[in-house]
Amino acid sequence: MSKNRVAAVGVGYSSTGRRLGLSSRQLAVQAATAAMRDAGMTPKDIDGSTMLWGVAGAAPPGLDVAESMDVASMLGIGPLNFWNSGAGPAYIGPAIQAVAAIRAGFAHTVLSLRVIRQRMTAAEMLAEDTDAKREYVDGDAQFVAPFGSVSPLQAIAGMPAQRHMDLYGTTEEHFGRHVIAQREWASHNPDAIFRQPLTLDDYFAARYVSKPVRLLDCDYPVDSASAIIYTTEERARDFAKKPAFVEAATLSSVKYQTFENLDDILDNAPVHCAKTLWSRTDLRPKDIDCVQLYDGFTIIVFQWLEALGFCGRGEAGPFVAEGNTAMGGSLPLNTDGGACNVGRRHGANFCIEAVRQLRGDESGVRQVPNAKAALWANAVGSFSGAMIMTAE
């Protein structure tokens, strides 16, 4: 992407934790304020705003939502030359909307946000949601629910993980090695919720949630907002922090929004997304210094490693077990500890960590030496997205 280059110049988080008692607007304002402070800018420097709220653009039952125009107005940003709120595969949606708006000339500086809050418990949803009380299911779920697959966890994690094991000989120890490596990174991250080192015994002691997926294979639900500010290359030099430039980016959809009825539960959106991403840059996997890959469940990381060509098809398990993705490995992966440890910030933490790594002076022990190119990716299944960023 040499023409009209776009750069990330400010990043920030809100307070993050379980059931904080803060509204979505409060979380959004906190994160946006932190990002503006990071960039050394004021609301008057911004003329665009994009946001994803809820889950895949939908408001979880019983939760308030925030909207990009409202949040911008609360912050004193405006008038806006571009704004958008809505759906997408995690944070990559509003990120690419922001980048596209700047490249098209609709806006020069765009605040992008991901606001997510904990869902209700299953018992709370059953008490409030009349649809959950029905004695039948329709849509794609009718083909799997009668056989016991009634949760996204089973469709997105349990079945793909089992399929990967059956096809390629992947083992639960391979999954455990990934979890241990991520916790090692998290142990050096003050933003991480979980920092206590793990052993393989600790991993195997964790209960199954959908065999072979264990509790430690799952991201940790939180209330959180994340903000990244993008601007033009020309303006990027005027702000406080070293910019991280967008080299290439893509969104992918291989089917309507389904997890139950994918043509292949392993060969889906990340495969198409990766092919498109590499076609938009001269960089290759060997040129990437660190990767930040969506880890809603461990198996998703394995799918991305293979789709992006960092290892062969079916080789993610051994690749991880050999220590390649751990501290000191050949491919530093999820260097903030991933969403299993920093909390389910729904993809935005991967962009923020990529930016911080490319700045080269903010990650302490976690810093990847001389990081020049970082790749981050979001989601899996029917839709996904990815972005390559560079230090120069």
Image (tube, helix red, strand yellow):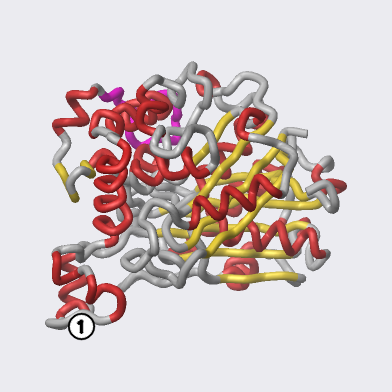
* Rendered residue at 32%/55% (across/down): 156
Answer yes or no: is residue 246 visible. no
Q: Position of residue 228 (x, y in %)?
A: 62, 50
Q: Secondary structure at mark 1?
A: helix
- Image check: 44 left or right of 199? right
* Image quarter of residue 204: top left
Residue denoted by label 1: 130
* Image quarter of residue 301: top left
- Image check: 210 left or right of 183? left
Task: Name the chief secondary structure element in magenta.
Answer: loop
Answer yes or no: is residue 275 visible. yes
Residue 190 counted in the magenta span: yes
- Image check: 151 left or right of 103? left
* Rendered residue at 45%/26% (across/down): 325
Q: Position of residue 314 (x, y in %)?
A: 39, 37
Please report the bounds of the magenta region as a residue range.
187-198
* Rendered residue at 66%/29% (across/down): 287
Which residue appears farthest toward the front when viewing the image? 167
Which residue appears farthest toward the top when viewing the image? 328
Dot 1 alpha-carbon crowd within 10 angstroms: few under 14, some 14 to 19, many 20 or more: few
Q: Position of residue 220 (x, y in %)?
A: 32, 46
* Image quarter of residue 385: bottom right
* Rendered residue at 66%/64% (across/down): 49
Please tell me whether residue 390 is drawn above or below residue 227 in the rendered image. above
